[in-house]
Amino acid sequence: MPTSIVTGAAGFLGSHLTDKLLSHGHKVIGIDNLITGNVANIEHLMGNENFKFIKQDVTEYLYIPGAVDFVFHFASPASPIDYLELPIQTLKVGALGTHKALGLANAKKAAFLLASTSECYGDPLIHPQTEDYWGNVNPIGPRGVYDEAKRFAEAMTMAYHRYHGVNTHIVRIFNTYGPRMRLKDGRVVPAFVSQALRGEPLTVFGDGSQTRSFCYVSDLIEGIYRLSQSDFHEPVNIGNPLELTVKEFAERIIATTSSKSELCYKPLPVDDPKQRRPDISRAQKILGWEPAVSLEDGLKLTIDYFKKRV
C-alpha cells in the first residue's frame, strides 16, 4: 500500500485528490494550515484508518516518519481574492513550501507532483496555450505574487529533478470547477452560480469577451493521477479545451439555474487574461487523457452542491 503526502489536503482540489488516492489503495497523510482550506472538505474521511491529517504550514520543516512513495504539493492560495489578500503567504508557499516538499520527496526517494497553473502563461500572446510557451507575465503586477510563485516552483521542481534525480511531475491546471469550491472565493463559477441562485445580477468584468475553459474536477483529478504514475517530467496542461466567453458562460449559468438574474458589468481587473484555453495534445499523447464530463453535466452537479449552501 503506497503512502502519499498531499499538501493543501483540505482545499478544493487537494481534498478531491485525497479521495482519488484513497480509492486507488493509497494511505494518505494530508497537510494543511487551513488559511484557505476547510476541514469540512475532508470531514468524511475522519475515522478512515488510511487517512491522517496534520495541521501545519508547509513552509516549515516537514517531519514524516516512515516510508513515503508520493508527495503531491497542492498547498497555495489559488483564487484572486485569496492571493491578493495573502500575497506574502502565496509567495512563501510557492518558494519555501515547494522547497520543503521537494526536500521531503528527495529524502524519502518519493515521486513528486507539483500543482502548477495556467497562470504561468499570464495574459498569453499565443492561443491555445502549449506547454512550450514561456508566457507573458507581469512580475510586479498584483497577480504576480501567484504567477511568479508558481513559475519559481516549477523552476525548483526541475532543479531537483536534474540535480538530485527526483522523479518529478508538473501539472499546469486550467480553470476547474465542482463541489467543494468556496462560495466567496472570487472565481467565476462560484460567483456566477451563487448570484444566479440568489437572483442577483451576475458580475461580469470588462465587456465579457474574455474567454475561459472550464474543466470538471473529476476529469482534472484523473489526469493528475495518470501524470503521477507516468515517467514524464516536463509540464503537462490539464484542462478542458471547450472555450467560452465569460458573457456566454454567465448566460449558460442563468439558463441552467432558471434564474431571472441579469448581467452587471464592472471594470476589468489589472492583468486579467483575455484568452485562456489549453492545448491538451501532450496529455492526450502521453497520458491517454481527455475530459469526459460535459459542461452541462458538470454544471448540474456543481449547482446542486451550491443550492445547499446559498
Image (cartoon, rainbow, N blue to C red):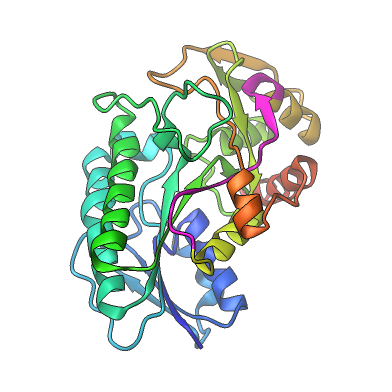
Left or right placement of residue 124 versus residue 306 in this view: left
User: Is 239 covered by the magenta stretch?
Assistant: yes
Any magenta on residue 14? no
Q: In this view, does 26 lie above or below 299?
A: below
Q: Which of 231 and 270 is in front in this view?
A: 231
Q: In this view, does 17 lie to the left or right of 90?
A: right
Q: Quadrant of the C terminus?
A: top right
Q: In this view, does 192 lie above or below 43?
A: above
Q: Position of residue 222 (x, y in %)?
A: 62, 61
Locate residue 200 relative to residue 3 in the image: left or right: right
In the rendered structure, the answer to whether residue 104 lies left or right of residue 28 reads left
Q: Which residue lies furthest to the left in this view?
A: 61
Q: Where is residue 14 in the image (x, y as percent from the top left)?
A: 48, 60
| Picture residue at 50% right of the left edge, 85% below the top | 50
Indicate the quadrant where residue 199 lies. Answer: top right
Query: What is the x, y in percent for residue 208?
Result: 60, 16
Q: What stretch is highlighted in magenta?
A: 232-248
On the question of residue 103 being in view, the answer is: yes
Residue at 70% over, 49% down: 291
Q: Is residue 310 visible?
A: no
* Residue at x 80%, y 29% (from the top left corner): 255
| Residue 176 in the image, given as x and y percentages of width and height | 58, 44
Q: Nearer the viewer, residue 126 or 163?
A: 163
The quarter holding residue 105 reads: bottom left
Question: Residue visible at 56% across and 65% down?
Answer: 225
Count the marks.
0
Above or below, 141 against 15 in this view is above
